[in-house]
Amino acid sequence: MMEGWQYGLLLNLENKLPTRALHDLVTLPGQKPVISYGPPGYSASLAAPGFLGRYLVSKLARMGTQVVVPYRDEDEKRHLKPMGDLGQIVSMEWDIRNEGQIAECLRHSDIVYNLVGRDYETKNFKFADVHVTGAERIAKRLVHVSHLNASANGEERVRSVFPNVTVVRPATMFGYEDKLLNNMATWPIWWKLNFGETKIRPVHVIDVAQALANLMSTPQLTRTVSLPGPSTLTYEYLLELVASVTYRAPSRAPVVPKPIALAVARAAQMAWWPLINPDEVERRFIDDANVPGDWNVVGVCPDEVENHAITYLRRYRLAKDYPRPVLFPARPT
Ligand SMILES: NC(=O)c1ccc[n+]([C@@H]2O[C@H](COP(=O)([O-])OP(=O)(O)OC[C@H]3O[C@@H](n4cnc5c(N)ncnc54)[C@H](OP(=O)(O)O)[C@@H]3O)[C@@H](O)[C@H]2O)c1
């Protein structure tokens, strides 16, 4: 079966498959010659190796690209190394406030993916430090990952420094390490805010990773690429989906009024590990932007959440329910 990135290459007729050149052959004294391979792009820097990052590293490594991974915590990048050949995944410690370290991390890369993001503020980093000021410092052939609903402010600041930036705006992603299906399975009460009526367009993290990897083989796109999932679904439907796939009774938790939710979220922020933060509470009331998807530009066809729900949710089943069939609730019309 054709991989998404191969399809992307085919779609892009002007972009011929790379031919080998003399400089692809590296010979070191006393060692075997090494032939570099993969699409032109050759080296990518990927800041930072979170949920989406791990899938993108895997895609890029399979394409033969060398990947530099700036990281802060040893344990956050350890799992990435076996995704590539020896020396293919290079991790480098960095601080997003240190311009020298940023330059060190990015200087050998032909393309930079900025995946730095955080959905809560910390003592050291406010939202603007991470999404605006930090992003402003990173430049090259830059792919800046934002969110479908993000304000254009941060993106405009990045574009003012780097006019050729490709801004990618995925909707909320689902996958093994997501904060969507996992969170719904463990804390359904927080998804009942707004009576579960908020509508989102969930997208598979693998599809977004493939879309980002395909950008390696397309000519530079200086536009915004929106990547919503194929369907618009309410939180209520998604909670029902989680309950039916996990064979757990649907939550009977009451709907928490917004002011109370905000007060709890403010108090929770004082805890060492925030359970929910005020910004998240506000977001639970905001529908995903109703903009058309740009999947044809990146050569990927996004998949429905139902097709993957069991993969990510089976672990929430009781042992006796493990082998039971997968049942879906009826989709609201
Ligand atoms: N998850 C979604 O559903 C979703 C949907 C649409 C868009 N996005 C966007 O996609 C991007 C990646 O999302 P994700 O879900 O992969 O996020 P994630 O798992 O939380 O990973 C975020 C990465 O950013 C790094 N980071 C955060 N604050 C930093 C700082 N002050 N300095 C340096 N590194 C910092 C983290 O490093 P540490 O591990 O060291 O903290 C981590 O590697 C983000 O921009 C996010 O806004 C996400």
Image (cartoon, grey):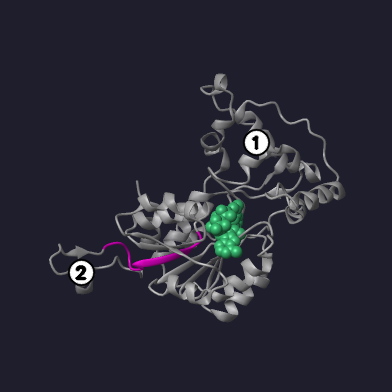
Depth check, mark 1 against mark 2: the one in front is: 2
Most extreme residue toward the top, as rendered?
Answer: 320
Q: Where does the magenta region start and end?
A: 37-48
Q: Residues within 10 Å of mark 1 (few under 14, many from 20)?
A: many
Determine the secondary structure under disc 2: strand
Q: Is residue 332 visible?
A: no
Q: Is residue 187 visible?
A: yes
- Please check the rendered image and state whether residue 40 is part of the magenta-colored stretch, yes or no: yes
- Give me the residue at 46% from left, 69% from top: 112
Residue beneath disc 2: 26
Spatial distance from mark 1 to mark 2, Cα to Cα? 51 Å
Question: Callout 1, which amino acid?
Answer: Ala
Work out whether residue 80 or residue 201 is closer to the camera in this orientation and state it. Answer: 80
Q: Taking 244 as reference, is 127 above or below it?
A: below
Q: Taking 320 as reference, is 190 above or below it?
A: below
- Give me the residue at 46% from left, 75% from top: 103
| Left or right: residue 126 compared with residue 311 | right
Residue beneath disc 1: 185
Residue 98, by quadrant, is bottom right
| Left or right: residue 7 compared with residue 192 | left
